[in-house]
């Protein structure tokens, strides 16, 4: 996560994607392994929650921070709308906007990951978490 | 932009099944599964403040009028109530007659 944050500060999209993929692979391995322990499933839970915070808070802040430095001004909602609606003409003309658009696409790609018919393999995660949870766990 | 419709309170994914044509959804957040009901939705009022939440992303992708960061979104109107929402000015008006 620290590496991911560092690469986010640098807006190094290649490294950001690599870091996110690494976290996703670790999460997936834990969730799908037949030998997963209670401690490991909690590590998967931690990855999932940290990624949630990263995307909904940190990534948003990083996009806003950089948009504030661009002239002519473009507000964050307008920028996200342009990318989401694939109206990329304005964005393509600006290097930083293009990098930010690429960053946002990496974020969306992670958000939309589906495995075993559920987003973020949630069904399998929950099934395993509930099975491994000790009876006396508070 | 003013939009008139019926308020639909979404508290869990089970509520997606009862979304009807012309509904205006009031929700804390949404899971991605909601997108299959998007053809029925007139607008979305979302409590989650993040512009990168599933609800916000889906609303933008499908060009659905929406407001995010609306405090107590699921309790400011009643389920089935007829309302007019003003997206630009973030206002909700309750209608006595439809």
Image: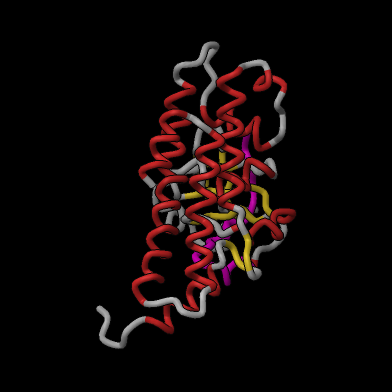
Q: Position of residue A86 (x, y in %)?
A: 71, 33
Q: How many marks?
A: 0
Name the foreground residue: A130 vs B12: A130
The vertical placement of A86 against B81, above or below, is above
Q: What residue is shown at x 62% (from left), y 38% (from top)?
A: B2
Q: Position of residue B9 (x, y in %)?
A: 53, 61
The vertical placement of B37 against A91, above or below, is below
Report which quarter residue B38 is drawn in. bottom right
Q: What residue is shown at x 56% (from left), y 59% (from top)?
A: B31
Residue B83 part of the magenta segment: no
Q: Which residues are magenta?
A: B1-16
Q: What residue is shown at x 45% (from left), y 49% (from top)?
A: B48
Residue B13 part of the magenta segment: yes
Report which quarter residue B65 is drawn in. top right
User: Do we see residue B17 in this rendering?
Assistant: no
Q: In the displayed structure, does residue B61 sit left or right of residue A47?
A: right
Q: Quadrant of the N terminus of chain B?
A: top right
Name the foreground residue: B50 vs A2: A2
The single residue placed furthest to the right in the displayed view is B39
Name the foreground residue: A60 vs A12: A12
Q: What residue is shown at x 69% (from left), y 62% (from top)?
A: B20
How was the colour assigned to the protein in this rendering? secondary structure
């Amino acid at each position: 996560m620290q590496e991911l944050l560092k690469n986010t500060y640098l807006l190094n999209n290649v490294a950001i994607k690599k870091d996110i993929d690494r976290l996703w692979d670790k999460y997936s391995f834990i969730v799908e392994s037949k030998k997963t322990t209670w401690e490991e499933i909690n590590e998967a839970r931690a990855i999932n929650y940290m990624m949630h915070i990263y995307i909904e808070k940190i990534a948003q802040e990083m996009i806003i921070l950089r948009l504030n430095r661009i002239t002519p001004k473009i507000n964050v909602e307008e920028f996200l709308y342009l990318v989401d609606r694939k109206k990329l003409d304005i964005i393509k003309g600006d290097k930083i906007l293009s990098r930010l658009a690429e960053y946002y696409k990496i974020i969306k790609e992670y958000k939309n990951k589906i495995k075993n018919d559920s987003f973020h393999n949630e069904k399998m995660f929950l099934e395993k978490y509930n099975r491994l949870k000790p009876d006396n766990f508070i | 932009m003013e939009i008139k419709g019926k308020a639909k309170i979404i508290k869990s994914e089970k509520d997606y099944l009862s979304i009807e044509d012309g509904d205006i959804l009031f929700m804390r957040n949404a899971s991605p599964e909601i997108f299959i009901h998007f053809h029925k939705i007139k607008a979305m009022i979302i409590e989650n403040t993040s512009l990168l939440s599933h609800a916000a992303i889906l609303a933008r992708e499908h060009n659905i009028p929406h407001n995010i960061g609306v405090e107590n979104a699921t309790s400011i109107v009643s389920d089935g109530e007829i309302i007019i929402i003003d997206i630009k000015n973030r206002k909700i008006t309750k209608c006595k007659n439809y």
